[in-house]
Amino acid sequence: MKITRITVFHVDLPLEHPYWLSGGRLKFEVLDATLVKVETDAGLTGWGEGTPWGHTYVPAHGPGIRAGIETMAPFVLGLDPRRVLDVERAMDLALPGHLYAKSPIDMACWDIAGQAAGLPIADLMGGGSRTPRAIASSVGAKTVDETRAVMDRYRQRGYVAHSVKIGGDVERDIARIRDVESIRLPGEIVLYDVNRGWTRQQALRVMQATEDLQVMFEQPGETLDDIAAIRPLHSAPVSVDESLVTLQDAARIARDGLAEVFGIKLNRVGGLTKAARMRDIALAHGIDMFVMATGGSALADTEALHLAATIPDANCHAVWACQDMLTVDIAGGRGPRNIDGHLHLPETPGLGVAPDEDALGAPVACYETP
Ligand code: MG
């Protein structure tokens, strides 16, 4: 089987509500999504998606995905998409780094490989837990009252896991954490996501002031060096997210004991192939995981769900899905959807969901074998 055509679509995905990170430092209103259709000489078609969370969140750039695919396409055309490692190597040789540009191609290849095998991607990867995965909400708010309002909105949709965005003013962060903990429901999972918004001194002030609560903080500093420096000075569990980009990062976090949890975002780490290796490092070191789309449509949510289904139930805290945050649905309601705050693995071979092509508009690029 050979890849014969790669068609690229650009879609804007507006957020239903303006979204704030780092205590209001960063605002987001629309996501730049790239959808990729990979066709083969065997008649199988796979879909991939790359949707960074804007271009101010991490070094990832919507137009950069499309430029990266233009550079990599000649090296990917003609390859067998079922040999995902060959495709990965070809992309890494054609364009070192730029992992976020590679994830849509990787995703589409896994989609085709699953269809060819007659298996959902998670089963093909050797996992395939059917235990529904809790969806973590994303509570981008600034004040105590706004935080309560956003959490209530998600609770009404059945959500039992929440990623509360903090990382602004120290006193306000402490007040918001204490307030959320005071209204936290039994069994609810709450992660306090700093998104790199603290200096070391700010991190220690909040983490030490809330030590009695033993809550988990995600990415409490800009870099792994920052997280390592404060590590001996607080007792809170830590999840690392934005600083977990490469397999070498995963190895360092595990070896140096920098976190209890990996936050694996598929677009950031370069797709399922590379993320599966991080999963194995985590499992080998007693590190649990959140698995997330970086953003995007139900396709990106489904990709994350497949990886989550390859993690033992006890080690997968939640997935994050972006679908409930958007005003447009390019998959017309198909694919795994929020049911009582959980996503259920699709039984369809491959990814299990494709976009409604009419909803994508005209392609912005098409690359073909001669
Ligand atoms: Mg995070």
Image (tube, rainbow, N blue to C red):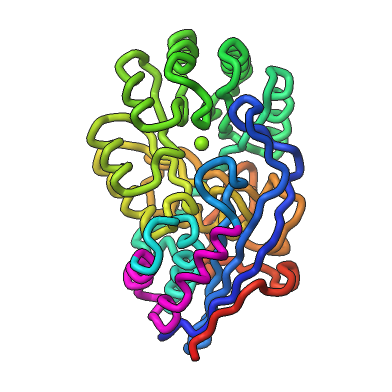
Q: Is residue 158 left or right of residue 196?
A: right
For the point 38% across and 80% down, the residue is: 80
Residue 211 shows in the view:
no
The image shows residue 209 at horizontal and vertical percentages of 48, 8
Question: Which segment did they paint magenta?
Answer: 63-92
* Quadrant in the rendering for residue 287: top left
Residue 158 shows in the view:
yes
* Quadrant in the rendering for residue 260: top left
Magenta stretch prevailing secondary structure: helix
For the point 29% across and 46% down, the residue is: 248
Q: Is residue 186 above or below residue 313?
A: above
In the rendered image, residue 175 lying in the magenta stretch gets the answer no
Q: Is residue 164 above or below residue 66?
A: above
The image shows residue 354 at horizontal and vertical percentages of 61, 69
The residue closer to the viewer here, 86 or 154, is 86
Q: Is residue 11 above or below residue 337?
A: below
The image shows residue 269 at horizontal and vertical percentages of 42, 51
Farthest residue, direction bottom: 370
For the point 45% across and 71% down, the residue is: 72
Q: Is residue 82 above or below residue 184?
A: below
In the rendered image, residue 87 lying in the magenta stretch gets the answer yes
